[in-house]
């Protein structure tokens, strides 16, 4: 499956079928993130149940602390 992730075209392996799988694939499942799919912001509760489709436009923003 091909998606557009933060503006870059990305090919995903077959086992990545949900937003939760996507976050695990990129090893950011434990970070505080905001995920938007096709212009719609998801709640964290939606990550496991939201299935990905070919050509989805996904934006992932995570927060970095500092001082």
Image (spheres, grey):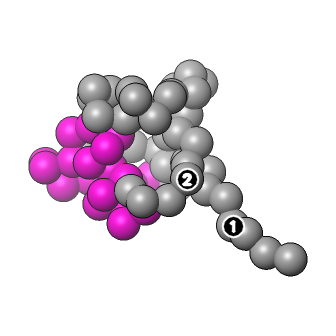
For the residue labelled by badge 1, is the local secondary structure a helix, a strand or a loop?
loop
- Decide which of tag 1 and tag 2 comes sooner along the chain: 2
Q: Is residue 54 visible?
A: no
Residue, disc 2: 32
Q: Nearer the viewer, residue 48 or 10?
A: 48
Q: What is the magenta range?
A: 9-28
Vertical arrangement, residue 26 with respect to residue 20, above or below:
below
Q: Is residue 46 visible?
A: yes
Judge left or right: residue 20 versus residue 65: left
Q: Give the percent coordinates (x, y) of residue 47.
A: 37, 35
Q: Residue furthest bottom?
A: 67
Q: Residue furthest top?
A: 40
For the residue labelled by badge 2, is the local secondary structure a helix, a strand or a loop?
loop
Category of crowding for the residue at label 2, using alpha-carbon neighbours closer than 10 angstroms: few (below 14), some (14–19), many (at least 20): few
Residue drawn 55% across the image and 53% down it: 32
Category of crowding for the residue at label 1, using alpha-carbon neighbours closer than 10 angstroms: few (below 14), some (14–19), many (at least 20): few
């Amino acid at each position: 499956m091909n998606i557009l992730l933060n503006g870059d075209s990305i090919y995903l392996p077959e086992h990545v079928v949900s937003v939760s799988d996507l976050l695990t694939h990129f090893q950011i499942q434990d970070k505080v993130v905001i995920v938007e799919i096709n212009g719609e912001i998801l709640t964290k509760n939606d990550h496991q149940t939201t299935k990905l489709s070919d050509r989805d436009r996904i934006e992932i923003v995570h927060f970095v602390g500092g001082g």
